[in-house]
Image: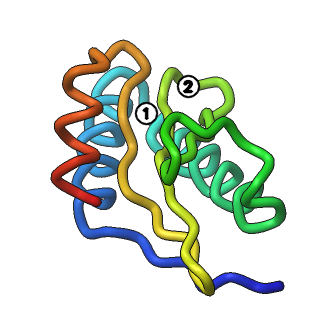
Amino acid sequence: MDFELIIKPIVLVDLDEAMLWYESEQTGLSLRFFNAFEKSIESVKTNPYAFLEISPSIKRVLIKKFPYKVFYTISDSAIIILGVCHAKRSNAYLRKRLRILF
């Protein structure tokens, strides 16, 4: 079954912040980060149930080679990307953020 991909607007803010930081560290690094993000999303689209479930309705996939996580949920016909977060963020921050988004 093909799922529709829905990306919450806050995800674009998260990505923009991360990409600005990576680009300030090294020219071209932001593009590598974005490409790794896209590969993670493609993996989710290919097999949305394969990744770690962090709560009954939220799953997480890691972005390879970068310390970031992508959080998503699956509805009947869609994969909804809820957020992108640095791996060092506290669990309290994640709970609060995902509660706001979901």
Judged left or right of residue 72, residue 53 is right
Q: In the figure, 95 relative to 10: above or below?
A: above
Q: Residue at x 49, y 39 (%)?
A: 55
Q: Is residue 13 left or right of residue 91?
A: left
> Which quarter of the rendered picture does the N terminus lie within?
bottom right
Circle 1/circle 2 CB separation < 8 Å: no
Amino acid type at circle 1 is Thr
Residue 72 in the figure: left or right of residue 82: right
x and y percentages locating residue 101 in the rendered image = 23, 57
Which residue type does callout 2 highlight?
A: Phe
* Above or below, 56 relative to 87: below
Q: CA distance from mark 1 to mark 2?
A: 16 Å
Q: Position of residue 16 (x, y in %)?
A: 28, 50
Q: Nearer the viewer, residue 101 or 84?
A: 101
Q: How many marks?
A: 2
Q: Residue at x 80, y 47 (%)?
A: 50
Q: Which mark is residue 27?
A: 1
User: Mark 2 = which residue?
Assistant: 66
Kindly report which numbered mark, 1 or 2, lies closer to the viewer in this rendering.
2
Say which element carries label 1. Answer: loop
Decide which of tag 1 and tag 2 comes sooner along the chain. Answer: 1
